[in-house]
Amino acid sequence: MINPFSEIFGCSSLLSVGFLDPDYILIIAVLTVGSIITGGYPIITSSSIEFSMNRIFIFVIFFLCPVILAFEVTTVCILVSSLLRNKESGTAFWRYLISGITATAILRTGSILIPGLLQNFPQQLSIVLAIPVVILSDIVLNLSFSRKCTSPVTDRIGRELTSYIVILPLTLITIILLIQAELLGALLAVSAITGFSFIGRSIVKKYRINQFRIREIIHQNILAARLMESFTFSEFLATLEEYFSKSEECSIRILSRSSGSADWILWSLNGQRNVTPSEITGNIPCKGRISSNIKVREITATVVGLSDNSDLLLLLSGLNENVIRRMPSNLLDNLTLLLKHTWEAVGHSMRSEKSFLAAAVMLARLADSKDDYTHGHSMRVSNLSCALGRELRLSRKNIQILRVGAILHDIGKLAIPIPILTKRGLLTRKEREIIQDHPVEGAKIVSELSGYEEVTKIIRSHHERLDGNGYPDGLQNIDIPFLARIVAVADTFDAITSARSYHSIADRDNAIETIKEGKGIQFDSRIVDALEKVVLSESAHQA
Ligand SMILES: [Fe+2]
């Protein structure tokens, strides 16, 4: 007959499996000891034990039982409290309650019914046979309670079996003891298996948690790097959406408020719009906190606070709230911190870039205005260069460099005296040298700015030729920066198609034909091909 105490402790031990957090290791240890002790409780009444020392030992254990019982009650209270506070723990609670009852029922059936049916069937062996059934029922219950889990069923079964494999050596030792021992010893062994399984699974779970944390930290670092590369807030949000939508469809918005302002700005992929406080319903969370079902205008979202003073919020719509709620607190803290800082850094860099571009455009206009024939030249070259960059599948970062470099490519003309720049007749050698010095002068101006090294290269090399007959450095082929080669093509195209002091207006086809003559000699062949495509598609668009 199975000791009811053993069953109670076996059940509560099984309950604790659902809480295999490293913090619960002490509880599991207590439960294991409890199971072993109560498994030994009936031995004190057994006449089969003849050694008096054993009797004394068991008596001591027996008197310790109330203390163990107190631990058990405390443990169950903790578990129930977890159930009330946390949905996830609640699921685990029910899973292991059922698992515990099933295990106990199987042990009871195995030990009483099977030997009854098969007269010579050893009772201990029935318990051994019951063990795989217990493991199987646990796996089935685990799978049925984690249906929402996205990983394949085979993976989950594999993980479950792995956790049992960890305890396999201990189980084998226990089975050997089981076969050789009396029924009460077998009970003790079964209790031990339960305890060992908890410890084994706890180790596996701890290992998995650590692996998950390391993986998430790597993902978050990659996310931060990608966010920092955003040129617009829409790009920022698109990158973030991609990060959160690993498993589900989700739309991301940011709600921000500048200090001292009552109104909010709602940032989405489609742009930004103002939101008044009355249009927001629900409690606005502070840093690292999560609020459910906040309504901003017509949008319902789960909201994560990103700043201490609650003026920067992350709005998640269409995402299972548990994805964010289940995130360990240190990972959530890390995520909120990196989102706040990257958002502010991207905003700051966008504002700086905007101011710089405005200043660059102003300077380029000033340079263009020195010669009536080059009015608007720099902006046209910039637009065409960017179109070529897109055709050549350049990264957004390179296109941005190209934009700025092309705007400023002729800025060195500011250093050329107007009479030389606007001279209509033949230039003297000295005058030509002065004009040909404008890339160097332009590069000097921009080289003072840190972070614009690539732009400086474009300005300096936009008059180089593949055959080395360009200026100022006579660079050849791949020695000429690729972005400068693009600007060279765009610059020449605009020079031919615009009214310049030394050219008449030519139509686009003629300009392309002229440039094609320099293919592979003056200009990069790939860029000339791209120019043809861009101009043809533009012509088709206009027609
Ligand atoms: Fe130039």
Image (spheres, rainbow, N blue to C red):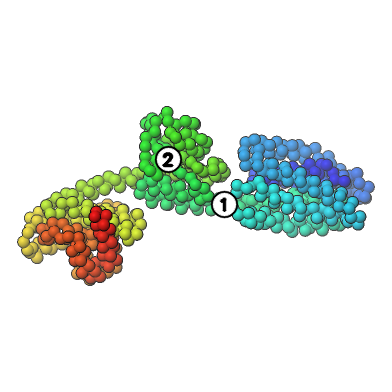
The location of residue 289, given as percent across then percent down, is 51, 37
Q: Secondary structure at mark 1?
A: helix
Q: Is residue 518 left or right of residue 35?
A: left
Q: On the image, which quarter does residue 536 sit in? A: bottom left
Residue drawn at x 38%, y 45% is 233
Q: Secondary structure at mark 2?
A: strand
Residue drawn at x 42%, y 52% is 226
State the quadrant of the C terminus: bottom left
Q: On the image, which quarter does residue 166 sit in? A: bottom right
The amino acid pointed to by label 2 is Ile
* Residue 342 appears in view: no
Residue drawn at x 11%, y 60% is 504
Q: Which residue matches tag 1?
A: 212
Q: Which residue matches tag 2?
A: 254
Please tell me whether residue 32 is drawn above or below residue 274 in the rendered image: below
Q: Are marks 1 and 2 in contact (CB under 8 Å)?
A: no
Give the number of the mark in front: 1 or 2: 2
